[in-house]
Image (cartoon, coloured by chain):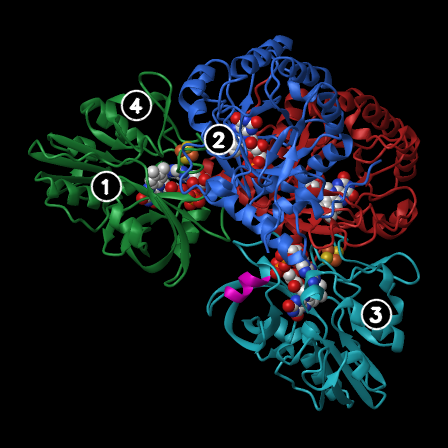
Chain colours: A green, B blue, C red, D cyan
């Protein structure tokens, strides 16, 4: 885990109201695994850091994909090249991508696309054939970038690709990785209990000390999303007890 | 110039005045990038005798310069603490106090007795912000008799230092501070979080599943400085200031207001190195002012 | 779509739920760039019977998301208010209540009697956060008997609406709210500022000349929402929420928590148009949600 | 009085750690009088606005001179061209510069130079002969700019000009205007009770509603610096009761 002041290197738009910002963070870029996240801090700005999946890691840089949903994300999107942002990471346990099996399907809803480029990279490296299924509300909300082998597109309103959810559009595979609103992940759990899903919770610290990021488990009790997650076996999470109305989920 | 930062608090000699506040540092084994050299002491996450799952999510909500939490004292209970954590603490170069909790006076006494003598446990911080289940859920912390009873129950079961963590939700904190002093407390920590609430205006109910939560962070600092100061004016035992400390300047406000030491809580969530930054900043400030030791810092402590 | 924003509060019909909080709007004649159309009502700066100079500077200090003030109720006294301000208020299209203060129960009664019937004075907000000089400086506001006595003294001297402004410095605000309700209050305002302190770490004494000050601003919002909610659960008279409202979203937290109306204070210092922004924002929110009136807004108000 | 989002147009250094920032604020520029101030607000940033004298007004722009003494000023100095800052003003009663008399002396200590360029402009326009006396701790702390007719320089350490305070270095004149740390203004009051001095106090609102900016008066009671000041007849202020240790005073 590293704590650095990361320089903003650029910003580009990838969907309606969705942007990628590039940060200079060599140690994080060198060590991050698919599904891990960074905790970004702004000063002046809100008190707490904000968690973001690492979208891509290229040489000394990491990328983060985001939408403005509140004060913190709006402020991040207002940063200009050369500004510094405090970056803590990589955090959390990412996807476990092992060789063995032949195919992987990556299922994302909205901003849930965030961990997928790195996941696709690692899955390919593990010799798996990768299929992406990316869904959003409508065509303009689909992330325009993909590093994957094949992309199946799904939209709720049918304005592009499959008319329906990305879960419904996804084929079966040996390895299923998913990220998106928690209610979408609950649907994944119904179909593939062994899928690995990256959940979202409010987070206070991102490092395991505040106990704020509780994930209710089927076996009872709670896990910490920031250290024991954010990636879980879909069948292990008590979806009914996990809030599905976080801001991010609300706007994704 | 090297400044003498040591402080003495109710039976313990600390190498520095900055401690980790309960519930914000886990059991000391989780904190990343930790600079141990700066820790005067650590107070563990609050535990009950028995394991507890804690409350359902959402457990935290951010507010201006603060955060609400309702963790519900999730924890492994005394046996797991003794087995998993205390042995590690025994090897550390600073004391670890256990923050103890109960729903009845006897709960507290029993927990202290169970932990007394366990290597690694250097003392107790008695959290009296819990509801007194025996007496209909009123808080131990805002009734001087109940606060004294809990303190006494712990005092009778241990020779280790007993600190009492005061709640701010009282009309007069001096009354509670004096009550626990008389009951044998070696120090008081002031203060715990303030009860607050935040509404989800789209869902028409509180953001936290528990409804209310405890407010911490810089938002409460001026309130905490005042309460710590009131406590320091009321008692002769040391007062440990807690609430909203992010930087050395903030800690110095508490120290000047009459506190002997301070605890850093929420700041660690934002800056894992907060405790070291606060410690080093106090030392640098004292050096700049020409003080050879923290003891020389002038205090503002008029007695009535 | 035009939303019905009117509210009824203890005898007064207001065209909107957003009022100016006492002490943050002067006498309504000073505020620059004022958009009167948005004001549901105004509460004047607190006055005593006699003129008061107020406290020596420094009177204010900024804190994270908040400010401390110790103005000391500087004001011209009842006669000047009647002469200089009330005549202006008489022509305004929203009611003006006078925030009244005293050091004894009879002070309050006398002040109410003097102002009762003066054209322009639409009612009273009784500030019980003052020290009760007759009883050794304890606050009227944290003793249910004293709070009720003051309310009754005012109630007996006027037929105008009597609101009581509660202090947050109590162990249980519901007890005080019920006490003033029984004594004849038509509504309660919750809450006044929280007592706090900030130290000047170069001068080794408090930043404010008075030592302590009242904390206001967004920092206290989660605490104020909780207290206003507790008050609303305790009484049947309307509760007016106050504390840290900067934006419509903040006001909506109080309204959902069971308040009938809100007051905006510190926000006006930062944004002279804050009251209009809050008013317009609530109307826009209600329209977006499809509510035809504020009365349709769902409330979260479980009764014990 | 106007409330606008003013665009930052530039920044230049005028002394050690002292800068001038230029803001686009046409209404304020058109109406400001010498000694008046603006209240600048930042979001994200500290809760309250920050008061600053208007240093110069040129066409649609105003200038403000400042030093970083705390979070607000540091943030203002970190703004870049094109950033917006909320600007409320002009506020307060400025200097009263009437024709009549022949000479004016402008006395400033440190950042107290702030209102002087506009004061010099107005005094010259009123037909007065203007002498500036500008003092600082040492040569590097002197503001390098002056629009005045003649400038007498004073430094506490004697590293430039007169060795001593600007008050001691100042000649008598028909009109005396002064600005600087309150304790310097107290010295002005001792020598010229009729001098007009711009005091500083903490301010909550800048508009007369918070009563936070109390100025203790010799005749008893308090005035509000933001509406009845910040300019006072030097002899009217109870200097012993006016705090002299504001941050700005501490670093000036
Ligand atoms: C592990 C993880 C990875 C994430 N990855 C991404 C990503 O790649 N791209 C992206 O756009 N968003 C991501 N999010 C969500 C992102 O953290 C929130 O959108 C962001 O915190 C909102 O901050 P705000 O100040 O704009 O919103 P506000 O609503 O103003 O935030 C208020 C508080 O709520 C918290 N909060 C609000 N929404 C969320 C949320 N959905 N999840 C967690 N906390 C929240 C904030 O952290 C803050 O403490 C991720 C969340 C988690 C937990
Ligand atoms: C009428 C007037 C005109 C001023 N003109 C100038 C100017 O032209 N150039 C300049 O550099 N400074 C000027 N100041 C002082 C300037 O307002 C402060 O330096 C600034 O507010 C400090 O803010 P901060 O956040 O950096 O400091 P902090 O110390 O972090 O501020 C904390 C709080 O104290 C207040 N504060 C701190 N110092 C002062 C002070 N000296 N005066 C008033 N409030 C203070 C802040 O407004 C804030 O509320 C003026 C002050 C007044 C009252
Ligand atoms: C997430 C969280 C958990 C906490 N848990 C405990 C606890 O178990 N026992 C306790 O006495 N105080 C607990 N506290 C209170 C802190 O120890 C501290 O008193 C409070 O947060 C104020 O300090 P701060 O503003 O520096 O955080 C907790 C605070 C937070 C934020
Ligand atoms: C400068 C100042 C002066 C105040 N004066 C009074 C007063 O005279 N009477 C009163 O009842 N409340 C007074 N208050 C309290 C406010 O009316 C309000 O209850 C409090 O500030 C919380 O609201 P806010 O956070 O919106 O400011 C004052 C507050 C401030 C900041
Ligand atoms: S976010 Fe703090 S423990 Fe997970
Ligand atoms: S600054 Fe508020 S009245 Fe002057």
Q: CA distance from mark 3 to mark 4?
A: 71 Å
In the rendered image, the quadrant that contains the N terminus of chain B is bottom right
| Residue segment shown in magenta | D73-78
**Residue A34: mark in rendering:** 1
Residue toward you, C16 or C183: C183
User: Picture coordinates of residue C230 (x, y %)?
Assistant: 64, 25
Q: CA distance from mark 3 to mark 2?
A: 54 Å
Chain ID at mark 1: A
From what the image shows, is residue C259 above or below residue B251?
above
Q: Quadrant of residue B166 in the image?
A: top right
Q: Secondary structure at mark 2?
A: loop
Q: Secondary structure at mark 1?
A: loop
Q: Secondary structure at mark 4?
A: loop
Q: Closer to the observer: label 2 or label 1? A: 1
- Residue topped by disc 2: B207
Q: Closer to the observer: label 3 or label 2? A: 3
Marks 3, 2 in one chain: no
- Earlier along the polypeptide chain: callout 1 or callout 4? 1
Does the image show residue A164? no
Pointers 3 and 4 in contact (C-beta within 8 Å):
no
Does the image show residue B129? yes
Chain ID at mark 3: D
- Residue topped by disc 3: D186
User: Left or right of A147: which side holds A6?
Assistant: right
Q: Residue furthest left?
A: A102
In the rendered image, the quadrant that contains the C terminus of chain B is top right
Q: Secondary structure at mark 3?
A: helix
Residue at (34%, 21%) from the top-left corner? Answer: A240
- Magenta stretch encompasses residue D11: no
């Amino acid at each position: 885990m590293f704590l650095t002041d990361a320089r903003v290197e650029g910003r580009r738009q990838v969907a309606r109201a969705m942007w990628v910002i590039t940060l200079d963070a060599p140690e994080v870029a060198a060590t991050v695994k698919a599904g891990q996240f960074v905790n970004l801090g702004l000063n002046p700005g809100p008190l707490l850091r904000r968690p973001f999946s690492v979208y891509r890691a290229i040489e000394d840089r990491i990328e983060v994909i985001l939408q403005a949903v509140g004060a913190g994300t709006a402020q991040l999107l207002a940063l200009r090249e050369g500004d510094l942002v405090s970056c803590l990471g990589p955090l959390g346990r990412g996807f476990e991508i092992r060789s063995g099996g032949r195919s992987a399907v990556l299922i994302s809803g909205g901003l849930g696309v965030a961990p997928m480029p790195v996941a696709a990279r690692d899955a390919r490296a593990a010799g798996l054939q990768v299929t992406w299924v990316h869904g959003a509300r409508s065509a303009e909300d689909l992330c325009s970038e993909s590093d994957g082998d094949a992309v199946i597109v799904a939209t709720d309103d049918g304005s592009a690709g499959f008319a329906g959810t990305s879960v419904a559009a996804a084929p079966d595979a040996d390895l299923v990785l998913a990220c998106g609103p928690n209610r979408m992940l609950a649907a994944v759990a119904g179909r593939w209990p062994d899928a690995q899903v990256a959940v979202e919770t409010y987070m206070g610290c991102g490092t395991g000390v505040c106990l704020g990021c509780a994930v209710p488990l089927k076996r009872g009790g709670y896990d910490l999303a920031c250290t024991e997650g954010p990636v879980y076996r879909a069948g292990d999470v008590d979806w009914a007890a996990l809030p599905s109305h976080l801001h991010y989920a609300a706007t994704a | 110039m090297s400044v003498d930062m040591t402080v003495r608090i109710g039976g313990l000699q600390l190498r520095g005045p900055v401690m980790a506040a309960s519930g914000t540092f886990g059991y000391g084994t989780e904190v990343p990038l930790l600079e141990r050299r700066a820790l005067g002491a650590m107070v563990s996450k609050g535990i009950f005798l028995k394991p507890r799952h804690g409350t359902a999510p959402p457990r935290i909500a951010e507010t201006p310069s603060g955060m609400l939490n309702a963790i519900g004292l999730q924890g492994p209970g005394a046996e797991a603490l003794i087995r998993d954590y205390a042995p590690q603490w025994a090897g550390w170069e600073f004391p670890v106090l256990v923050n103890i909790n109960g729903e009845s006076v006897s709960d507290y006494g029993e927990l202290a007795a169970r932990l007394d003598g366990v290597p690694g446990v250097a003392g107790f911080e008695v959290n009296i912000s819990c509801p007194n289940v025996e007496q209909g859920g009123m808080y131990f912390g805002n009734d001087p008799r109940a606060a004294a009873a809990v303190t006494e129950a712990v005092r009778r079961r241990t020779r280790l230092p007993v600190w009492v963590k005061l709640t701010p939700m009282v009309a007069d904190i001096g009354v509670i501070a004096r009550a626990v002093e008389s009951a044998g407390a070696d120090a008081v920590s002031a203060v715990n979080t303030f009860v607050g609430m935040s509404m989800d205006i789209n869902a028409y109910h509180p953001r936290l599943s528990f409804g209310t939560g405890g407010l911490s962070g810089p938002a409460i600092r001026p309130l905490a400085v005042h309460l710590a100061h009131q406590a320091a004016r009321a008692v002769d035992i040391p007062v440990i200031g807690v609430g909203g400390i992010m930087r050395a300047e903030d800690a110095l406000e508490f120290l000047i207001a009459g506190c002997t030491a301070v605890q850093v809580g929420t700041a660690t969530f934002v800056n894992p190195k907060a405790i070291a930054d606060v410690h080093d900043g106090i030392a640098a400030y004292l050096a700049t002012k020409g003080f050879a030791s923290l003891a020389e810092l002038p205090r503002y402590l008029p007695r009535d």
